[in-house]
Image (cartoon, coloured by chain):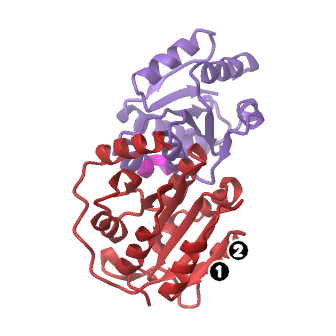
Amino acid sequence: MNTVEIQHLIDALDWCGIKYLIVVPATGLEAVFRHFEARGHCVYATREEEAVAIATGLTLGGEKAVVIMAQAGVGNALNAVFTLADSYRVHFPILVCFRGREDPNLVQRISAAQTHVVLEALECAEISWKSASSRAEFMNLLERRQRWIKCEL
Amino acid sequence: MLDRTETLKTIVAHATAEVCLISALGYITRDLFSLTSDLRERCFYCMGSMGSVVPLALGVSLARPSVHVFALEGDGSLLMNLGGLVTLRRYARGNVSVFVFDNRCYESTGGQPSQPDSFNIEDLCRATGLVTYVVTQLHELEEFLRNREAGDAPAVLVIKVGLSSPSERANEQPELIADRFTKWLATC
């Protein structure tokens, strides 16, 4: 994502009232982390499963949270999503970031291909941050209680 | 070795009005469910997500600073997400107490050992910088619970327990548990 797209992402999160970001850091999103760090509401988890559990607790407590993860973290997150967030119907979105299909890391390319298959099975939505209208689209996804949302970095 | 159910009874008895309890899957949730018919709204009974009690408790504690969260974990479940202790140390304030029921095995699947012989889980907890107590007598637990004060950092109590039969399964829908818990948290 370029800086304009990153800003659209940040604007969308703000516009939707997202207060907490829980994340295992992914390349390319440093500006997003800084935005939430400045507010004291960026929580760095050691594993994506943990991020899901933290977001579940925050949401139970009435806060609006988002989990952002690199595509390679999806597998790590599944148990907590299935047996905690989904089972207990605690909604918050999980934004899964993919690098482009020309990722120089061959393992990431293989992982990304498989993660797309998994996310399709999980009825993942897709969003682009190219336009400022993405914030309305993101709001719509939240209102639909969409769990998995993917985008490209 | 302490008895798990008797230990939980003691913890529940000291769960004052601002306390909520989050329990790990398996026998801990079963026992807590059987002991808390009068305070269900303050309990979150995990029936899955092994290893998630500590981060779940962290999330609740951040959202509700006036609530004190009792996180009731098993040693096997804690081992599944050790990073959670580090994250707890990093972000938690003083409104989290983690109770680790340490029977050194995966009791609900038949008692397979969870730790090597020369390993003590309290050493691992201390290594993360968390204030850690070891409890082998009930009066030690009672003393902590009576004197518990809101400080700046969470505490971990590793409670050495033996094996014991579980209570009946929790027979509530997960969504009901979450909805009721959320509503109670909203009043705090």
Residue B92 appears in which quarter of the rendering?
A: bottom right
- Residues at badges 1 and 2 in contact (C-beta under 8 Å)? yes
- From the image, tell me which residue sits under label 1: B123
Residue A86 appears in which quarter of the rendering?
A: top left
Q: Position of residue B63 (x, y in %)?
A: 57, 43
* In this rendering, position of residue A32 left or right of residue A122: right
**Which chain's residue wears label 1?**
B
* In this rendering, position of residue B70 left or right of residue B156: left
Q: How crowded is mark 2: few (under 14 residues within 10 Å), some or many (20 or more)?
A: few
For the residue pair B79 and B164, the one nearer the viewer reads as B164
| On screen, residue B155 above or below A119 | below
Judge whether residue A79 is colored magenta: yes
- From the image, tell me which residue sits under label 2: B127
Residue drawn where x is 41% and y is 39% of the image: A90
Q: For chain A, what colour was chosen?
A: purple
Q: What is the spatial separation of the Cα atoms under label 1 and label 2, in whole angstroms? A: 6 Å
Most common secondary structure along the magenta stretch: helix
Q: Position of residue B98 (x, y in %)?
A: 55, 67
Amino acid type, label 2: Ala
Does residue A67 appear in the picture of this structure? yes
Does residue A110 appear in the picture of this structure? no
Residue drawn where x is 46% and y is 64% of the image: B15
Q: How crowded is mark 1: few (under 14 residues within 10 Å), some or many (20 or more)?
A: few
Q: For chain B, what colour was chosen?
A: red
Judge whether residue B103 is colored magenta: no
Residue drawn where x is 58% and y is 24% of the image: A17
How many marks do you count on the picture?
A: 2
Q: Where is residue B181 in the image (x, y as percent from the top left)?
A: 39, 46
